Amino acid sequence: MKLSDFDFDLPEALIAVRPAKPRTSAKLLLAQDGQIADHRVADLPHFLRAGDVLVLNDTKVIPARLTGQRHRDGEFGMTAAKMDVTLLDPRSDGTWGALIKPLRKVNDGEVIVFSDALSAVVEGRADGQAALRFNLVGDDFDAALNAVGAMPLPPYIAAKRAADEADKSDYQTYWAKHAGAVAAPTASLHFDGPLLAQLQEMGVEFVHVTLHVGAGTFLPVKVEDITTHKMHAEWGEVTPEACAAIATAKAEGRRVIPVGTTALRLIESAAQNGGIAPWTGNTDIFITPGFRFQVADGLMTNFHLPKSTLMMLVSALMGTQNIKEIYAHAIHEKYRFFSYGDSSLLLPPSD
């Protein structure tokens, strides 16, 4: 298929720069049995049933945007240069991959100071990125980062406004637990405590998995032949406990519905050898039309960027023509798009 098959025109006014409040007041488009209906996220209990399993990504977004200074002692004495840093991903050697602007003004071995508590040594540079080793680890690192970092808002929001204090709660899921993401699993932003309690009371089961969403989720597809696109990799984990709960639900004929494309990609990665199995590692699974889903019986998700890998994923789930009709309806009804936008519950026909 061609990249142009996943393109559409989106009015600029429909790009959300702030979330709906309360979270459950966001619109919810329900697509099932060839029908499209307009609801609110608060109505979700009407469309789920006892025994359904919602798969939730419990990654935690870190305040990954930092501003610091590099100091250098040269022929004109001590000089300083401002450094804008965006953390990308934690690496197995203990460093962080990062974007630094301007990268040309820092050398390997130099220190970038972000606060009295937090600094990092540049240990290497390659392919436009740097490897940073921070002076703190664990809870000390988390506390220092939270004190000075800003939330890494998506480019289409950051172009319109700067991140502020409200984003530290708005751009974080209710159940966020394992720090490491630089982008939120945004379908999950629509849930709050009362909605979760209502769903649990009616017999909906929750299973937590972890996929640290990387900045690559915003990378555009640049090739017209989508089969030649190289997918970015992200670290994830499906624990034995999560795997067992999902496998039991599938064996009993109960629906497994991931909340967000990140949760869907992870559980499908864990099921590529047949039945779902525990998984830990990087996944670069690329889901396009023709993909055979092993686990997901539906998907709750926001509305995605034109020509993105996520448009290809929802097209694989619902069918390319159906997705075009769903998105046309959403635009006509003025749904709010992207990370802080409205949501949808996509339920394809069962085989």
Image (cartoon, rainbow, N blue to C red):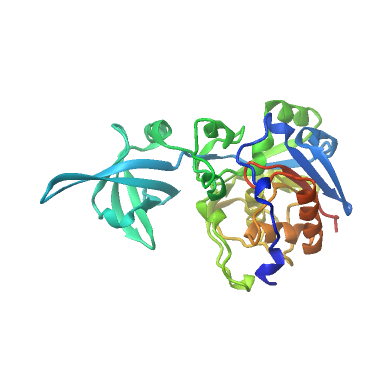
Q: Is residue 241 visible?
A: no
Give the position of the N terminus as an image quadrant.
bottom right
In percent of width and height, residue 94 lies at: 37, 48
Instruction: Tell me the quarter of the picture where residue 114 sits.
Output: top left
Q: Between residue 20 and residue 254, name the one nearer to us.
A: 20
- Direction from residue 119 to residue 239 in the image, left or right: right
Q: Quadrant of the C terminus?
A: bottom right
Give the residue drawn at x 34%, y 49%: 132
Can residue 289 be seen from the camera position used here? Answer: yes
- In terms of depth relative to the viewer, which is nearer, 276 or 147? 147
- How many numbered dots are placed on residues in this image? 0
Res 189 → quadrant: top right
Please state the horizontal and vertical placement of residue 53, each as a whole percent of the image: 75, 41
Q: Residue furthest left?
A: 75
Looking at the image, which residue is at 33% across and 58% down? Answer: 125
Q: x%, y% of residue 29?
A: 79, 45
* Depth check, front residue: 312 or 157: 157
Of residues 336 and 289, the one nearer the viewer is 336
The residue depicted at 89 percent of the width and 52 percent of the height is 33
Q: Position of residue 77 (x, y in %)?
A: 12, 45
Left or right: 80 in relation to 297:
left
- Left or right side of 303 for 125: left
Rendered view: 125 above or below 69: below
